[in-house]
Amino acid sequence: MLTLHCPYCGVNADETELDAGGEAHIKRHGPGSDDNQFHDYLFTRENPKGVHLERWRHAAGCGKWFHAARCTATLEVFGTYPAQVYEPPQDIKDAISAKRPGWSWREFE
């Protein structure tokens, strides 16, 4: 079973206490965006076999959204961090790189 640490309330919650919210760090275009940008926002997602950055909500706890870096193939969790950041913290990027040589975090717009 998947267990994630909520960075807000400090609880190690299993997946029955959490709601998945899809891919993290998706650029949301504002007013004036064209149809292609809106299409990409709605439908274009990474779906890797391997390291993935995801949004989760601690539904049965504090109710706050946070991000998690984990491997979709092994369920290995590299860390969790608040949702109000634009990229994963350096310690999480270092943890991923240490176990997955050659991995690099893509630059989000």
Image (cartoon, rainbow, N blue to C red):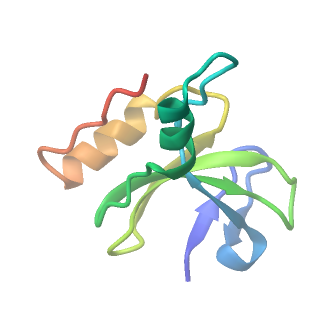
Q: In the image, what residue occupies the spot 46% across and 34% down?
A: 88
Q: Position of residue 85 (x, y in %)?
A: 59, 27
- In the foreground, 38 or 13: 38
When asked about the image quadrant of residue 24, the answer is: top right
State which quarter of the image contains the C terminus: top left
**Location of residue 21 in the rendering, given as x and y in whole percent from the top left corner:** 65, 57
Q: Residue furthest front?
A: 35
- 59 vs 7: above or below: below
Q: Is residue 72 above or below residue 101?
A: below
> Considering depth in this image, is 29 or 86 the residue closer to the camera?
29
Answer with left or right where residue 19 lies relative to residue 99. Answer: right
> Which residue shows up at 59% across the image and 71% down it?
3
**Residue 26, position in %: x, y?**
53, 37
Q: Is residue 86 above or below residue 80?
A: above
> In the figure, residue 1 lies in which quadrant?
bottom right
Rendered residue at 52%/42% (across/down): 39
Quarter of the view holding residue 48? bottom left
Total labels: the figure holds 0
Q: Is residue 51 left or right of residue 18?
A: left
Q: In the orientation shown, which residue stands out farthest toward the left?
A: 102
Seen in the picture, residue 6 relative to 102 is either above or below; the reply is below
User: Is residue 93 left or right of 34 when viewed as pictured?
Assistant: left
